[in-house]
Image (cartoon, rainbow, N blue to C red):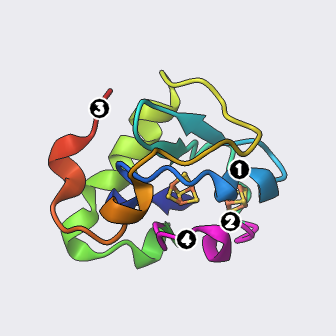
Amino acid sequence: AFVVLENCIRCKYTDCVDVCPVDCFHEGPNMLVIDPEECIDCALCEPECPAEAIVPEDEVPEDQKEFIQLNAELAKVWPVLSEKKDPLPDADEWNGVAGKRQYLER
Ligand code: SF4
Ligand code: F3S
């Protein structure tokens, strides 16, 4: 499955959801995650993310491995988002900022 990484936090551009053929993105307060049980590995979402926050599971960086489990876990509790909406208001300021893991809201 594909995995949403740390750089989605506080950005949530949502360009990814528009291209997903199986609606497997789930929305939390300041991040989206992918349901690994629904993702069909089509790879369409990866180039759409302005924050470059989506990668295939085998390309998740060593220091972000916990996001594999986080996507699986949070996809079970957060609702599906199937249409693009406005990014978070400060998305451009937060895009690329290091250490955003601490700001993940559930
Ligand atoms: Fe959806 Fe395809 Fe991205 Fe998986 S790889 S989340 S199926 S767009
Ligand atoms: Fe997040 Fe990128 Fe989608 S910032 S909401 S993974 S377009």
Residue 76 is situated, as x and y percent measured from the top left of the image, at: 51, 26
Secondary structure at numbered mark 3? loop
Q: Are marks 2 and 3 in contact (CB under 8 Å)?
A: no
User: Any atom of ligand 2 within 8 Å of the CB at mark 3?
Assistant: no
Residue designated by label 1: 17
Residue designated by label 3: 105
Which amino acid type is marked by label 4? Pro
Residue 92 left/right relative to 36: left
Secondary structure at numbered mark 2? loop
Q: Which mark is residue 45?
A: 2
Q: Earlier in the sequence, mark 3 or mark 4?
A: 4
Q: Nearer the viewer, residue 72 or 81?
A: 81
Residue designated by label 4: 50
The quadrant of the picture showing ligand 1 is bottom right
Which amino acid type is marked by label 2? Cys
Q: Earlier in the sequence, mark 4 or mark 2?
A: 2
Label 4 vs label 1, nearer the camera: 4
Q: Nearer the viewer, residue 25 or 59?
A: 25
Q: Which mark is residue 30?
A: none
Q: CA distance from mark 1 to mark 2?
A: 7 Å
Most extreme residue toward the right is 21
Q: CA distance from mark 2 to mark 3?
A: 23 Å
Residue 19 left/right relative to 12: right
Q: CA distance from mark 4 to mark 2?
A: 10 Å
Q: Specify the segment rendered in magenta.
A: 42-53
User: Any atom of ligand 2 within 8 Å of the CB at mark 4?
Assistant: yes
Residue 92 is situated, as x and y percent measured from the top left of the image, at: 42, 64
